[in-house]
Amino acid sequence: MRQFESMLNVYHLLPRRSWQSLQSLHIECQSIGINCSMDTLRRWLKAWLAVGFVEEMTESKQYQYRQSRHQPFITHTQDALLLHWLSRYFAPLLPDDVYRLLNKQLQVLDIEATINQSVSLRQYLDVIEIDLPTLPHYYHFPLALIKKAMLQQSVIHCVFIGQSLTLLPQALVLNRQGWWLRYQIKEVALKEKEPVLSLMRLVVCLLWVDES
């Protein structure tokens, strides 16, 4: 999750018209707290490049980047559809600043009306199957605490149906079976300092979360 937030922040640092060198972008990243090597930064940029959001130019063996002028999502209806999916499935996991931006955009766009009125987009909606579970809003707060613990690599206390655990959260996984929390626990009997057991559990079995 921390890497995902860093990649989003790196993307927003890129200019839209002029080019920015890899070296100057790395310095700018360091100045705002994104601690990564030059190689890691280039891997992130190559990932954005692969999906069409970033352009790359090589001049005198110097890599330069900017935001792509040919975005994959460029029409009003496509933007609405993307925001709709983000708000439905991934809003609790987005970085705080991105989540605020999403809410602002959702207030501007009448998403459902835009999607329903789009004849050109309807042909895609008829064949694309999105069958993912949606969590009720009261799960947003415990998910936010879990996200915070993952970013800080801190231990939290989670109460599930039938079990109470002190754990180190690793990842939140979404698939057709539901939202899953992957976590590590310490084996008290062995008195190990490092987590030794890695498990997964459905988020719908989670009752509440306490920060340690």
Image (cartoon, grey):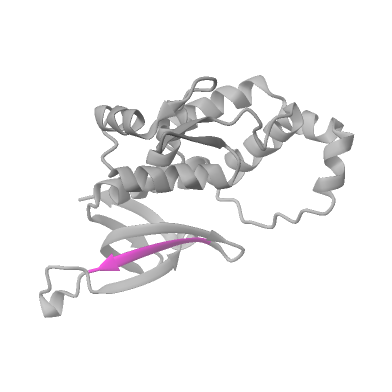
The one of 86 and 160 positioned closer to us in this rendering: 86
Q: Residue at 28% of width from left, 44% of height from top? A: 37
Is 181 above or below relative to 83?
A: below
Query: Residue 80 sits in which quadrant?
Result: top right
The spot of residue 70 in percent (x, y) is 66, 31
Task: Decide if residue 167 is in sight here.
Answer: yes
**Residue 162 in the figure: left or right of residue 126:** left
**Residue 137 in the figure: left or right of residue 35:** right
The spot of residue 14 in percent (x, y) is 45, 27
Magenta-highlighted residues: 179-185
**Residue 196 in the figure: left or right of residue 19:** left
Number of numbered callouts drawn? 0
Q: Residue at 41% of width from left, 48% of height from top? A: 43
Q: Residue furthest front?
A: 60
The spot of residue 40 in percent (x, y) is 34, 47
Query: Residue 155 sits in which quadrant?
Result: bottom left
Q: Residue furthest right?
A: 119
